[in-house]
Image (spheres, helix red, strand yellow):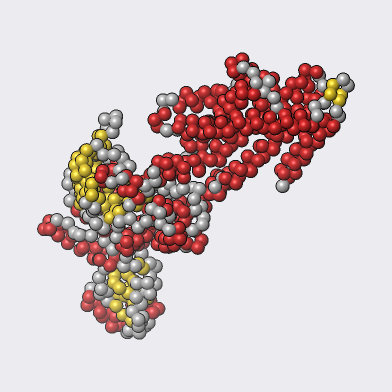
Amino acid sequence: MIKLENVTKVYQDGTKAVKDLSLEIEKGEFCIFLGPSGCGKTTSMKMINRLIPLTSGKIFVDGVDVMKLDPNELRRGIGYAIQNIGLFPHLTVMENIATVPMLQKWPKKKWRTRAAELLHLVGMDPGTFLDRYPSELSGGQQQRVGVARCLGADPPILLMDEPFGAIDPITRAKLQDEFLKIQSKIKKTIAFVTHDINEAIKMGDRIALLRQGELIQYSDPATLLNEPKNEFVRNFVGADRVLKGMRLYRARDVMQEPPLMFTEDENPSTVGEQMRQNMLNWAMLVDKKKRFLGWITYADLEKSASLREIMVEPAVTTSPETPLNEAISLMLNSAIGNLSVVDDEGHLLGVLTFEIIRNILSQESDDKKSDGGVKK
Amino acid sequence: MRKYVILGGLIALLLGITIWMTGLESVGIFKMAPATKVLKATARHLQIVGAAEALAIAIGIPIGFFSTRKAMRFVSPVLIGTANVGQTIPTLAFIGIAGAVLGMGYKAAVIALFIYGMLPIIRNTYAGIRSVDPSVIEAARGMGMSKMQITTRIELRLAMPVILAGIRTSTVVNVGTAAVAGMIGAGGLGELIVTGIAVRVTQIILQGAAPTAALAIILDAAIGGIENVITPRGLKILKAAQWQQ
């Protein structure tokens, strides 16, 4: 879909911003350009839509050499979002989102319906926001409109330059999650620039790590974390790369069937017997519809004749979509040390324990040795 | 509301003085200018200001605009510097110099006022365009707007309130400067004032001065009105929000 061939950029003052860069981004792939500042990641991205002219080499979009296209036509066919958003302050949200449809001379009637559709997609109410001005929106809302705007004419390719860089961490995480959800629906080919390794791991299908204009490693996040090509990559991903790798898993990938699960009318002595047999000091209590109620500990069993009375209410439960790193921090906070995974209606799906996670991790490193990395 | 009452009152007062003075017909041995002459002088005054402003806008906005372009980066400091320093020359001195260089009469006055009036327009156009957020321009470029579209739909639209403020300053100043241009024989209301001063008759001075003042107030309010209408709503909201912070 996007192909860079021996691309080099030398600025007028002689700085070599990008050196002989070759890489390919496949259709529907979320590709991250990652690296410290001055590594050439933004320059590389901006050469794709010719905002920055290339010194030598070739860039193909959908098999066509971009130098053979009219630059404005090329750009209208590629979505573009930047860190500072750059919404037009004198135009309404609707007019902002419809910028490219307007430039492509869509009939006027379609501008509004398209803008409403996209606003809805990014989680904003069209009725409330279509006719507002950018200055009436919060930072997070402006960023959403910026994302909606880059999707304006439904381009197959998006270029995004740290689009979530300028907002607070909580909103950023939320926008990242939402954008991943959107991407799973719209399947765009994306070149996404960031200097944040965590964002790269979370968002990317593939990561191109650059340093001083050179491509150091181009691989999927798991490989980048587990098999850093050299010292630079090792340092860049950081000493906590095992913990960072946890982001790549969701609770549903790791959770196991609850080893012991009882309904509340079960006889406590039977429960105790089973716990002894399984050498477990905890069990899970569910109702008749398998909705999770709470934990039973062995020590409490003798205190009462009813399971319901000795049950420890769950302080936290989690959804199957939670990244493993977040799940672990929930487990560290819970008195039981285990975490129940439930669906939206509260049905028990599985359980996470430290032991399970430790097993997964050791298996993981064995796999590495044999086949070189897991697919996300 | 109060603003309009004060404005209306002031204009009425000044016009009242003009009509009253004209009605006197003569003061001592001196004859007052007849009503037709006052009207003609007013029309001439407007003509001078109008012609000078039209030229100043037509040439000042492009100069201010092109001064912001990269290609002009070596010339623009000189241009903008000249515009800034030029504005500090007092009107009286400017007209004096203009009279010496360009000679006397209507044409010389229009040229002088055009040059003088162009300065705030150049300066404000430059400042207005420069104040446009670079990320807005980058986004526009990235989405495939042509240079022309960026200029007309983004830069000039966003700079318009500031440019209009420059035109407003320029016009109001030039109504006054045109009166001073009476000294170099431009005609207009300045002529009445100059005559009045020469024969030391306050009433004749007032006959020229009062309508000049009224003219300045009326034009200021009118352009202010245009400014208000033309400023995009989104920018007003933005400004209000910035004030609150």
**Nearest the eye: B110 or B128:** B110
Left or right: where B163 falls relative to B145: right
Rendered image quadrant of residue A353: bottom left
Q: Position of residue A320 (x, y in %)?
A: 31, 67
List the single residue furthest toward the top.
B100
- The extreme right residue here reads B28
Rendered residue at 35%/67% (across/down): A318
Is residue B124 found left or right of A116 in the rendered image?
right
Query: A139 or B95: which is nearer to us?
Result: B95
A149 is higher (above) or lower (below) than B126: below
Image location (x, y in percent) of residue A7? 22, 41
Residue B146 falls left or right of residue B223: left
Q: Is residue A114 visible?
A: yes
Q: Residue at x 33, y 42 (%)?
A: A51
Q: Residue at x 29, y 72 (%)?
A: A350
Residue extending farthest front: B36
The residue at the point 56 percent across, 23 percent down is B86
Nearer to us in this view, B60 or B243? B60
